[in-house]
Image (tube, rainbow, N blue to C red):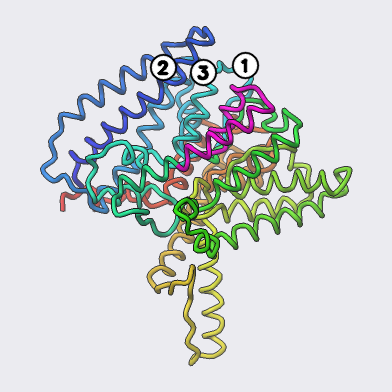
């Protein structure tokens, strides 16, 4: 591993985090909150550490795969550690384990919280939580690539290590320009959502929910989440936009350049919408007896289906009261997640479809050994190495899920709580079921369990391997 290059890059990353902290600092001054030091101190520390790392002079300035994965894995952990400081210094979460959990949950866009009453938390801290959701949605390293023009062509390894999905390519011939296009689309959609929400609710609320929705993070500024407003308008607007943010951003790029026909041909997009709206109809029919009419049932089922599948995690109703059938659908959506190349978490629709297509191929081959079947996805042949990669990912996903659920079971909570808390963490969703349902939170867990879940959240957001590779001895060899 090229240590000097990795930590020099992380130094640039810390400058970005220091700049981000300026926004909640401004809000703390505007609202005359006496916690400005909670942001000033971290900013000073970040700039000091960043300055020290800037003196590193790597002999090799090009990124390779190993360096890219290491940079992403280490930087997200460090980002979360420094991101925890405002919570600690403001006395919002004086316990380091709580603060680290909250920061990791924010940057990974999980949205799980250990804060029992968010409404009494200073507005500047509320904004910092929402901002972590927004930055983590598109990716911290993608942000750096977008704003640092001298980043070399091998920065694709940073983009690959941080982005969601099976494969990451450049939208244009230049990686920096690709990152900028992604962020411009991201910012544009966020601003549009902000404007639409501001028509109905206060600007500060709109800002927080626009940031959280864009990153599909789900941090709320009210204890009852979106249900606080009891507004069909707010629910529909947010549901539509989180559905949009769960779509591969490459599709938006194709639409912008006028290639709408190719964008609509996306196989993953069709499956994504089919699964989402199919789940919506099934839950609406199943919950019809709870609500007054089918329209209300459809409203709540669509919002929750979109919120869970895109791994946003907002709630407009207490779905803990739904029948087991509806809750099982939500669990399935938790596992599937959104599209590759989106801000959503989960396994991703593309992997799920390749997984099932591979199974069908094997069944056909078992019935007729002479039958030759080719798997295609997005009108391209899926190589055997890609199929193996999908199965390896699913195996690692299930292994981490089971181990995490086993470890946190030491706290003694029921199996539904432990399983859905672990599933919610690795898929970056937020709420689970039972004690971690939409009206509960993660403060019930011990410090040990919070660290386990924090690591799982980081592992899930980075598609498993950038964190897992940190435990590989071969990473630390200079070859």
Q: Is residue 269 above or below residue 320?
A: below
Question: Are dots 2 and 3 in contact, CB under 8 Å?
Answer: yes
> Circle 2: is it few (<14), some (14-19), or many (20+) Cα within 10 Å?
many
Note whether 86 is above or below 368 in the view shown: above
C-alpha distance separating marks 2 and 1: 18 Å
* Residue 41 counted in the magenta span: no
Q: Which residue is mark 1?
A: 120
Residue 92, percent from left and from top: 53, 18
Which residue is the extreme one toward the left? Answer: 59
SS for callout 2: helix
x and y, in percent, of residue 419 in the image: 60, 48
Crowding at label 1, few (<14), some or many (≥20) Cα neighbours within 10 Å? few
Q: Which residues are magenta?
A: 185-214
Secondary element at image label 1: helix
> What is the CA distance from the residue labelled 3 to the residue labelled 1?
12 Å
Alpha-carbon distance for marks 2 and 3? 9 Å
Residue at 50%, 54% (x, y): give it: 255
In the image, what residue occupies the spot 51% across and 62% down? 350
Marks 2 and 1, the one that precedes in the sequence: 2
Q: Are marks 3 and 1 in contact (CB under 8 Å)?
A: no
Q: Is residue 438 left or right of residue 77?
A: right
Q: Position of residue 269 (x, y in %)?
A: 56, 59
Q: Secondary structure at mark 3?
A: helix
Q: Which residue is mark 2?
A: 39
Rendered image: mark on residue 124: 3
- Residue 325 appears in the figure: no
């Amino acid at each position: 591993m090229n240590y000097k290059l990795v930590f020099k890059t992380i130094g640039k990353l810390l400058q970005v985090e220091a700049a981000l902290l300026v926004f909640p600092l401004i809000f703390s001054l505007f609202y005359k909150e006496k916690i400005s030091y909670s942001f000033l101190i971290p900013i000073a520390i970040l700039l000091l550490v960043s300055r020290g790392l800037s003196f590193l002079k790597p002999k090799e300035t090009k990124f390779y795969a190993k360096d890219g994965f290491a940079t992403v894995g280490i930087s997200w952990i460090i980002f979360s550690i420094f991101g925890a400081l405002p919570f600690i210094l403001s006395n919002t979460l004086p316990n380091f384990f709580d603060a680290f959990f909250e920061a990791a949950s924010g940057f990974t866009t999980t949205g799980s919280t250990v804060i029992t009453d968010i409404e009494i938390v200073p507005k500047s801290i509320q904004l910092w939580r929402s901002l972590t959701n927004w930055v983590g949605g598109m990716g911290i390293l993608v942000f750096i690539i977008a704003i640092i023009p001298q980043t070399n062509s091998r920065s694709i390894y940073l983009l690959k290590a941080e982005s969601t999905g099976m494969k990451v390519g450049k939208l244009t011939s230049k990686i920096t320009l690709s990152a900028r296009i992604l962020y411009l689309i991201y910012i544009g959609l966020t601003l549009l959502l902000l404007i639409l929400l501001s028509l109905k609710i206060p600007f500060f609320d709109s800002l927080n929910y626009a940031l959280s929705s864009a990153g599909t993070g789900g941090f709320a500024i009210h204890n009852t989440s979106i249900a606080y407003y009891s507004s069909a308008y707010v629910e529909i607007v947010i549901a539509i936009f989180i559905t949009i943010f769960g779509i591969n951003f490459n599709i938006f790029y194709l639409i912008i350049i006028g290639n709408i026909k190719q964008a609509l041909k996306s196989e993953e997009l069709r499956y994504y919408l089919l699964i989402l709206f199919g789940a919506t109809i099934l839950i609406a029919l199943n919950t019809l007896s709870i609500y007054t009419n089918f329209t209300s049932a459809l409203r709540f089922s669509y919002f929750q289906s979109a919120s869970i599948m895109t791994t946003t995690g907002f709630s407009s109703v207490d779905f803990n009261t739904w029948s087991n059938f509806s809750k099982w659908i939500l669990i399935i959506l938790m596992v599937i997640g959104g599209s590759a190349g989106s801000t959503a978490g989960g396994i991703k629709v593309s992997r799920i479809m390749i997984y099932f297509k591979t199974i069908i191929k094997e069944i056909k081959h078992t019935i007729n050994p002479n039958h030759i079947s080719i798997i295609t996805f997005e009108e391209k042949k899926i190589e055997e190495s890609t199929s193996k990669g999908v199965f390896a990912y699913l195996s690692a996903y299930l292994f981490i899920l089971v181990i995490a659920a086993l470890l946190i079971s030491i706290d003694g909570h029921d199996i539904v709580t432990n399983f859905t808390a672990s599933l919610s963490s690795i898929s970056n969703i937020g709420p689970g079921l039972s004690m971690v349902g939409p009206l509960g939170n993660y403060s019930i867990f011990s410090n040990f369990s919070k660290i386990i879940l924090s690591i799982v959240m980081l592992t899930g957001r980075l598609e498993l391997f950038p964190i897992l590779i940190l435990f590989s001895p071969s990473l630390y060899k200079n070859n």
